Image (cartoon, rainbow, N blue to C red):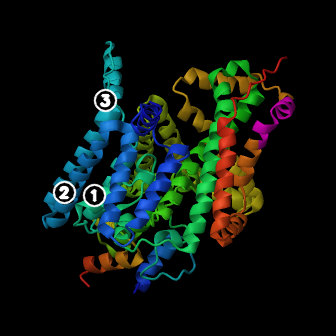
Amino acid sequence: MISQELKKVILNELNLDDFDLQDETIAPEVPGWDSLNHVNIILAVEKFFSVRFKSYEVLRLKNVGDLQKLLDSKLGK
Amino acid sequence: MFQNIHLEKITGLLKYKSGDPLLFNTSLFLILFFLFLVIYNLFKNNKRARIISLIVFSFYFYYKSTEYFAAILIVSAVINFFFGKWIADTENFSLKRIFLALALILNLVLLGYFKYTNFILQAISDLRGTEFNPFQIFLPIGISFYTFKALTYIFDIYYDTLKPTKNFLDFVLYLSFFPNVLMGPIDRAADFLPQINKESFISKEDLGRATFLICSGLLKTVILSSYLEDNFIGRIFEFPLRYTGVEILIAIYAYAIRLYCDFSGYTDLAIGISLFLGFKIMDNFNSPFKATSIADFWRRWHISFSKWLLDYLFKPVQISLRRWKIFGNIIGLIVTFFICGLWHGAGWNFILWGLYFGVLMSIALFLQKPKAKLYNALRINNTKFLRFFQIIITFHFIAFSFLLFRLNDLQIAKDMLSQIFEFFHGKVALQFVEKMPLIFGLIVIGFISHFFPVKIEAVIKRSVTALPLAGKIILLALVIWLVAQFKSADIQPFIYFQF
């Protein structure tokens, strides 16, 4: 389940009003989430939640659900 | 005596001959493949025998291109199989990284020795101003493709998105699988390995798709590629100063479509042949000249390779430099396209070709926002009008880049450009159409079929699928006959235009 905060950060970075982000959603399915923009989203998430990911952790993400899990683990949830 | 000669001829045909690989569009391949399919189907219910027969045929296929250097495949298989296992087995993350680094080094040394030794030594001696006599090093074709294939296995295990296979033969089959061993697609281990243990089954849809792809592959590689090359493009590129700018421009367009047809046609054959064997391998092209930007082009051209670069090179650089913001992206782009160029061949022209794209995409990064503002102000955003111009402009950037791709002598590229700008003579185009209707017709067919709406292509595919088996065989036979006509046709005399 994608949290409202994470959804807000991602949609804000992509200038999208709304998009149904699910655990299985992958980047190419979301308008504007391309390989060049990907890095901005990761930076925005790190900044908003004051966390820091390792490159290895980011590179193995497959979908938004994985990002949520990674974020939760950093926030100690 | 007669019998002896006959046998010798056959064994001669079956043996390795330098510079004569077993390409899919040759009659020898089609005969051998048909015979192999019969054997392969006999082993339908015996998985082990089926896999072994496929490995044996794959090694024979690779032997036809590389003689005993086919053994490199075994070396590569052993290295990557065991490193994959070690990376997965160790819990210690630092050790994991060391294994990854060692696997990378061994793969790159293997590739580098065969492909880049002379190039690197030449560059060093050029810098020093000394003379260099190149070593006689055999280049086993396909090595860049299967090395990159093997690396998908290593990286995915490292990122823990793939479990290593326990079966060495399965891995050997993945690496040596003949449909994609010479020219890709660079299929992913994660997609291929699970298919080995599935029932070998070909559905009606797959059979239709395979027939369609084999027909299109044959037509593309023989008629739209080889014929155009031998009878038109090759001559213009060899002595451009003998021709007018307009002819050179037509040759540049023709070369773009020829390169696409040659490579994508070969991929079509590879995918079609794999389907006949019950395997689905990844797509490699998606109408690349329909691209509206350079980035879009690389999402549509040689997809298995560009996705490899994106996942295993660009993203790691980009993510580790993410605090540098846009400059992290730019370094990622330049490094990625430098490697992209170098991967295509050991030559400065390839490096320049790669860097050309790296620089163009970096510039595009800076233009992204102003462009969006301009389009919005002009109210042309997302319009067909804008798309049309984007496609035309992108196509020209791509078509002209292929000059670098083809020519290692930059003087010829300069000559071609100077003829276009200083000696255009547009009227000659009419003479060209009149005197070389077949060549002109083929170029037009090449572009029209490329820009076919996806819907029409889908209708054609569906019609081929709907054909009964006999219909499919007749269609295939017709295409083979047509292709044979073009293959056996004498090289057309070229008409010099006089002024």
Same chain for mark 3 and mark 2? The answer is yes
Placement of the C terminus of chain B among the 4 image quadrants? top right
Three-letter code, disc 3: Thr
Residue B255: percent from left, percent from top? 64, 37
Label 3 chain ID? B
Which residue is labeled 3 in the image?
Answer: B117
Three-letter code, disc 2: Phe
Q: CA distance from mark 3 to mark 2?
A: 26 Å
Q: Residues within 10 Å of mark 2 (few under 14, many from 20)?
A: some
Q: Residues within 10 Å of mark 3 (few under 14, many from 20)?
A: some
First to last magenta residue range: B429-441
Residue B37: percent from left, percent from top? 46, 59
**Magenta stretch: helix, strand or loop mostly:** helix
Mark on residue B82? 2
Q: Please tell me whether residue B5 belongs to the stretch shown in magenta.
A: no
Q: Is residue B128 left or right of residue B86?
A: right
Label 2 chain ID? B
Which residue is labeled 1 in the image?
Answer: B154
Q: Please tell me whether residue B435 belongs to the stretch shown in magenta.
A: yes
Instruction: Answer with mark 1 or mark 2, whichever residue precedes in sequence.
Output: 2
